[in-house]
Image: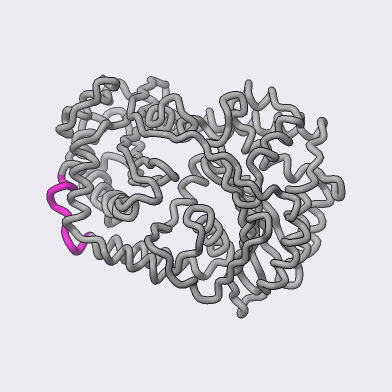
Amino acid sequence: MVSGRKQNAREQKFVQVGAAGKLPRNVQVTKLSNGMSVVTDRMEHLESAALGVWVKAGSRDEQPWEHGIAHLLEHMAFKGTSRRTARDIAVQIENVGGDVNAATSAETTSFYARVLKNDVPLAVDILADILNNSLFEETELKREQHVILQEIGAAKDSPEDVAFDDFQAAAFSGQTLGRSIMGTPETVSSFKADHLRNYLSDHYHGPNMVLAASGNVDHDEIVKMAESRFADFGATPAREPESCIYTGGESIKLRDLQEAQILFGFEGRAYHVRDFYASQVLASLLGGGMSSRLFQEVREKRGLCYSIYAFHWGFSDTGIFGVHAATEEADIPELIPVVLNEFKKAGQSINQEELDRARAQINAGLMMSLESPASRAGQIARQILLFGRPISNEELMERLNALTVDRLSDLAMRLFGEANPTIAALGPVSQVPGQAEIAQILGSSLPDAAQ
């Protein structure tokens, strides 16, 4: 099972797209009568296949009293159906050498399997069974709630996880994107079987679902299986979640730790907006590898930390650009100004060599992902949920190649110089400046509500 920021990071694929274009090679799409999409990406030279159901429903679709229910539902889907016990599910898929798993993120939930090509019908049947026929039996529910409580406890024991949770809570104050995906002990413990059934009924509708398969698969056969096994999901689109906006904020918590966790954040870009792609590239340029500016300046030249990296998470209506560093208390007074100075320099001195290197890294990642059926299935599923169609890598590269040094510099100036920043710090962090001081150093001023 995968949840939290790791899954959010996994979903940040380069799926920015403009007008409709040709389908990628070997990709076929069929829409069922209830609005569910079936998409396949045939790789006939393989002996295996990866397939799954992606649902446009995640933690941000929850009501306050449902906090954590999307993640609990993902767990409970494997705990027994009217046709299979929890052990049957595990044994049947592993008897053929396959595996089955699931993941929850802010905006999607996925249930997926990997099998040999002849076992695709079994995998489709199991996925359909757990989504159509889960019993949510009381004993299993209590047991799995206990498991998730342990998972929440383990996350609280991880300073990095706590810092990231605080970071999102500050960046999206009082909103669903600011809540942890796992929920709280209080909310998770409160759920009954009917709560799970109601959430599934409210959000798992045909137009919000994609069955995606990649590998040695036959499109027509998978469509036939989907028509018979997923027909009961409603044809009316599920309601859209409430909009979220980036607020900025601060969370600085002193804790007796050896290492200080520090995160800087700025308003990112949603998937659909023009600067989404540029934001991804800027994150790579600033902190996407050993050759990046932050790694070279902060770690290699000055030795101020072991780990520092930048990231950009896009959502359907907003986004967040961030930098994470872990360092010793004694290095904080030097590290903070160096990092902030790199933000300021990004708006003034990006060069063509850096842009070309970032493009090459992204292109290599795209090409390497083509070698994995699981990556291909997940990517095309999310593209359909976001944009209504799969996107070819050629089209993605056209978007990348359209970026210029001037455009990245302009984005950096707006991102950092006109920003309402977020700062989250945990550990021996008494020397970490607050939100207002960081904004002042960067030359921006906070909105009235944030001051």
Q: Magenta segment: does it hold 401?
A: no
Name the foreground residue: 88 vs 109.
Answer: 109
Number of numbered discs overlaid on the protein picture: 0
Whole-percent x and y of residue 133? Answer: 80, 46
| Residue 84: percent from left, percent from top | 85, 49
- The quarter of the rendered structure image containing the C terminus is top left
237 left or right, relative to 92: left
As displayed, is residue 325 above or below residue 129?
above
Question: In the picture provided, is 377 more to the left or to the right than 253?
Answer: right
Q: Quadrant of the N terminus?
A: top right
Q: Give coordinates of residue 22: x percent, y percent.
A: 46, 72
Image height of 390 relative to 175, above or below: below
- What residue is shown at x 70% (from left), y 54% (from top)? 100
Residue drawn where x is 72% and y is 61% of the image: 226
Q: Is residue 162 above or below residue 311?
A: above
* Segment colored magenta: 345-354
Q: What residue sits 27% from the left and 50% below the top?
A: 286
User: Is the image coloured rainbow, by chain, by secondary structure, or in one colour?
Assistant: one colour
Q: Position of residue 149 (x, y in %)?
A: 65, 28
Dividing the picture into quarters, in which one does residue 323 lie? Answer: top left
* Vertical placement of residue 64 versus 301, above or below: above
- Residue 349 magenta-drawn? yes
Asked whether the viewer can see residue 123, the reply is no
- The one of 67 and 46 positioned closer to us in this rendering: 67
Task: Tell me which residue sits at (58%, 71%) in the image.
Answer: 28
Could you tell me if residue 49 is visible in this image?
yes
